[in-house]
Amino acid sequence: MDWIREILYDLEDKNLYRRRILREGLKDFCSNDYLGLRDHPRVVEASKRALEEYGLGSGASQLVSGYIRVHAELEEKLAQFKGTPACVLFGSGYMANVGTIPVLAGEGDLILSDELNHASLIDGCRLSRADKKVFKHRDYEQLEEILKKERHRYGKVLIVTDSVFSMDGDLADLKALYDLSEMFNCILYIDDAHGTGTIGRGRGGLEEFNLRWRGNVVLMGTLSKALGSYGAFVCGSEEVVELLVNRARSLIFTTSLPPAVCAGALESVRIIDENPDMVERLREAERRLLDVLSELPYDVIYEGTPIIPVLVGDEGEALSISKKLLEEGIFVQAIRYPTVPKGRARLRFTASLRYSEGDLELLSEALRS
Ligand SMILES: Cc1ncc(COP(=O)(O)O)c(C=O)c1O
């Protein structure tokens, strides 16, 4: 079909064509498995036990017959870990965001969203049919101006932010957002996908800023990144959780998470809970990676999180560096538009407890060559 070919040629022409690369045999420096938990012996063992006990799939959605003890245990543990009264699981982070935001805001409401928020948050905002205003990245003065001007015109107002921004690795100032949300009577929706397991002793954004959960805060997190599993969760008040169970379409109309996936994630949370030094060790791993990346003639962004992008700028150049590194057995994705703005292409390196000194030497040699 011509129209398909045209789209694909156009993408190729702009260096924006995307290809999936088989990871086997490569040293992966861009995964979100920051703590190396996906194959931790305890996680694998817990997962295996659940597989033997329950089989592979959960069999149905949460509201039909797909809600079992391991789901409830994981929800309870996550609520305790995050310091909230309740928690509910979702099939993925994408599903949590597109399902929850439209439940919290709809027609006649206003959503205020950071310009660098993750695509799943943007899609959730679009689906909600609420009015939307995007504020400049981490510009809370602009946010306050908008609130002063617009707050009185709306019923509910939802402020939406990543805690750790997924492509830059920087942190939202959750204290500023927490205060603004209280001052202007707003709901604060925090996507803690990359904060969970990496900041605030592993408990994420609120703990990092020494904040305690409050009733107007809704906290989303994923099982798929530092927890080394798959799926997601939303923490908040009992009421919010009940509302999501009754209204969130991406929870109601989909099969619940496989038990083995939840059992593995539950073990990961326990491991982080028992070993708060893991986050300190992750900071050391970040500094070691940063030392290696500093040899490059590009700006390297380091904001105290494991996401350490090397800003290349030009899409073609980022792609060609990524390809050359692949030839050396090193896997780091060139992140390009529309994931990041045009002309802001980058190599998104991530630090992880997985890497040995030998791995970093290999990376250093490859970068030099
Ligand atoms: C900030 C953020 N939110 C949500 C998601 C989606 O999570 P998941 O991969 O579990 O769908 C991601 C990553 O993919 C993310 O980076």
Image (spheres, rainbow, N blue to C red):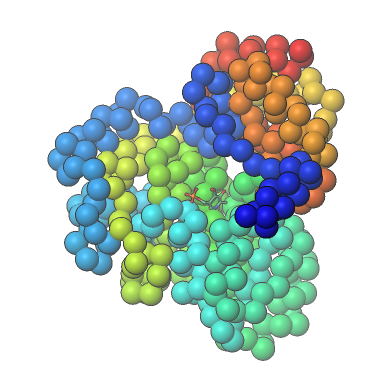
Q: Would residue 28 be found to the left or right of residue 170 on screen?
A: left
- The C terminus: image quadrant: top right
Above or below, comparing residue 152 to residue 216 in the picture: below
Measured from the top left, where is residue 68 in percent x and y?
Answer: 20, 54
Q: Would residue 33 be found to the left or right of residue 51 on screen?
A: right
Measured from the top left, where is residue 254 in percent x and y?
Answer: 34, 61
Relative depth, front residue between 39 and 291: 39
Give the residue at x 61% y 38%.
19
Give the residue at x 32% y 51%.
257
Above or below, comparing residue 334 to residue 184 in the picture: above
Q: Is residue 185 visible?
A: no
Circle count: 0
Q: Quadrant of residue 301?
A: top right
Residue that protrudes farthest toward the front in the picture: 1
Q: Would residue 282 be found to the left or right of residue 301 on screen?
A: left
Q: Quadrant of residue 311?
A: top right
Above or below, comparing residue 49 to residue 224 in the picture: above
Measured from the top left, where is residue 322 in percent x and y?
Answer: 70, 28
Residue that protrudes farthest toward the left in the picture: 53
Give the residue at x 75% y 27%.
321
Measured from the top left, where is residue 174 in percent x and y?
Answer: 62, 57
Relative depth, front residue between 207 and 93: 93
- The N terminus: image quadrant: bottom right
Give the residue at x 49% y 45%.
196
Above or below, comparing residue 285 to residue 222 in the picture: above
